[in-house]
Image (spheres, rainbow, N blue to C red):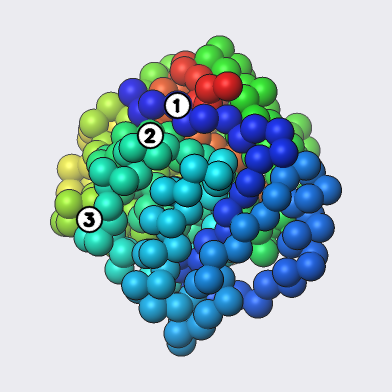
Amino acid sequence: MSIAVPALRPEGTIALIAPAGPAALDVEKAGQWIRSRGYDLRILPGVYERDGYLAGSDKTRLNDLHTAFADPEVDAIFCLRGGYGTPRLLDSLDFELLRGNPKPFVGYSDITALHLAINRYAGFVTFHGPMLNADLLGAKQPPTESSLLGMLRGDLGAGSVLAHPAAFPLITLEPGIACGHLLGGNLSMIAAVMGTPYEIDADGIILFIEDVNEPIYRIDRLLTHLRLAGKLAQVAGVLVGDVAGVEPVALERLLKQTFAPLCIPVLSGWRSGHCDPNLTLPMGALVRLDAGEQRVVLEQDVVFK
């Protein structure tokens, strides 16, 4: 079980880092958004940099991440955006530093590589959730914000059902109940780190997947990659998030072809990923997936007060 992290305390400090791609930041707007919710904002230097398709050099982005974790005044770490570049940091991460300073770490997309590495080698819960630029400052609809802040503040504990908006119906592809650690994220990134020390440990997990701008044949290729690597045979259940840009009927057919032979619960349509709303999920946390009842239940606290 991944350990819980300290809750985001009232009037705490949120650090903003850019471990992947660059993005123009409206500093005044970002500060106003954070302060209006009762927090202080600390922006790390790499947020202001650009190195081609990367937000600063590898050294700058790595230093920002380490600085944010090491700073005792920082209560949570939000990523500016995804894009490209986080796998370049993995073999330089100071896992001893991270393990000694667990705190909420939030992001998705390319940030998946960091979620997988932190879970495997630092052992604490991280959060697949909205990023500042595209999601929180992009006025994504409820419950994007409430899902994130409610989880970080400790409003949800062991036994809590993760709420899903009724406006977005879920699809039970294979019924059943399974318990396991919730792990995964962006499917392309999960596949990209296969064969490295940071690949997903799929033994008994509830696998979460999402993606964007990948045609159906690419999604097929990525799932087949995981199947041939023996990963899919190890999972206890599957939660499918948003797969943006893929025709729903074609996706459902592919998912059934892929997962039906495994005889495990599979629930699809969860609004997490490159979508609006974008719900927060606790990576590494022990959960119970009930695909028939279309519920995800926390089996552990993910933060502590």
Name the mark nearer the viewer: 3 or 1. 1
Give the crowd class for mark 3: few <14, some 14-19, many >=20 residues within 10 Å.
Answer: some
Q: For this rendering, which residue is in front, 211 or 161?
A: 161
Do tag 2 and tag 1 residues touch (Cβ < 8 Å)? yes
| Residue 206, percent from left and from top | 39, 31
Give the residue number, with chain letter if any, for mark 1. 4
Residue 181 visible in the snapshot: no
**Residue type, numbered disc 2:** Phe
Q: Disc 3 to disc 1, how far (Cα)?
A: 26 Å
* Image quarter of the C terminus: top right
Q: Is residue 145 left or right of residue 283?
A: right
Closer to the N terminus: mark 3 or mark 2? 2
| Residue 73, percent from left and from top | 55, 44
Residue 304 visible in the snapshot: yes
What residue is drawn where x is 47% and y is 18%?
300
Exactly how many numbered labels are in the figure? 3
Give the residue number, with chain letter if any, for mark 2. 124
Q: Disc 3 to disc 2, how far (Cα)?
A: 21 Å
Residue closest to the far top: 159
Do tag 3 and tag 1 residues touch (Cβ < 8 Å)? no
Residue 273: assigned label: none
Give the residue number, with chain letter if any, for mark 3. 194
